[in-house]
Amino acid sequence: MDALTALHERVSVTRLEGPAPTPEQREVLYRAALRAPDHAWLRPWRFLVIEGAGQQRLGDLFAKAALADSPGLDAVALERMRRKPERAPLLIVAVAAHREHPKVPRQEQDMSCAVAVGNMLIAAHALGLGAVWRTGSMASHPVVRSGLGLAENEHIVAYLYVGHSVGPVKSLPRLEVSDYFQSWPPG
């Protein structure tokens, strides 16, 4: 698939199954992430690749975090939380790792990490894989941060779920460019 087709047709795929991406497909995803714009070449990111038993361990962290917030959480809700990391055969946790720099603020470093995730989404689509970017309360929960070993200068930007689409992929309506892009100054 050519780059413009991948950019114009990519959609989030929420229902994913195995097999996990091959080593060759992973290499393509990872290389796409590393081409994100990065002012001053800080590489303000790192990525945790989680699958199999690692997803179960992350699920245990999610459950522990949920119980910390709601000690009376019922068993069904707790199990649903525990299973969230298993929604795809491969989970990539994108971590913004801020570096001190006089010309590159933290916000710009976060955006660089976010573009790296976006690049992986587009690459996954180009490879015929499905992927979805999720965040939610477990992206900032102190129990999860600690369990994943995040440093003070780090935070989770995305949980990127990757696998193969289950069923047909939804199509999105065509957006009108003129609704979002205007000349300035008007006139």
Image (cartoon, grey):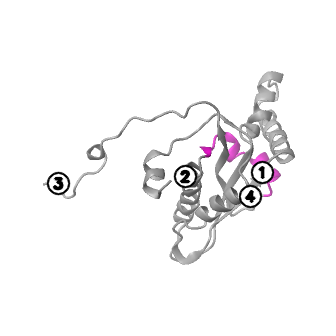
Q: Viewer-nearest of labels 3 and 1?
A: 1
Quadrant assignment for the C terminus: bottom left
Residue 29, by quadrant, is bottom right
What residue do we see at 81% from left, 39% from top?
A: 59
Q: Viewer-nearest of labels 1 and 2?
A: 2
How far apart marks 1 and 2 lie (CA) works out to 22 Å
Residue 157 placement, left or right of 184: right
> What residue would you read off at disc 2?
126
Looking at the rendering, the stretch of residues picked out in magenta corresponds to 129-149
Residue 74 placement, left or right of 140: right
The percent coordinates of residue 128 (x first, y second) are: 59, 47
Magenta stretch holds residue 104: no
If you read the primary sequence from the N terminus, does the residue marked by circle 1 or circle 2 appear first?
1
Neighbours of disc 2 within 10 Å: few (<14), some (14-19), many (20+): many
> What residue would you read off at disc 4?
23
The percent coordinates of residue 57 (x first, y second) are: 85, 44
> What residue would you read off at disc 3?
186
Secondary structure beneath disc 4?
Answer: helix
Residue 73 placement, left or right of 175: right
If you read the primary sequence from the N terminus, does the residue marked by circle 2 or circle 4 appear first?
4
What residue do we see at 76% from left, 29% from top?
A: 80
User: Label 2 near label 1: C-beta < 8 Å?
Assistant: no
How far apart marks 3 and 1 lie (CA) works out to 49 Å
How far apart marks 2 and 4 lie (CA) works out to 16 Å
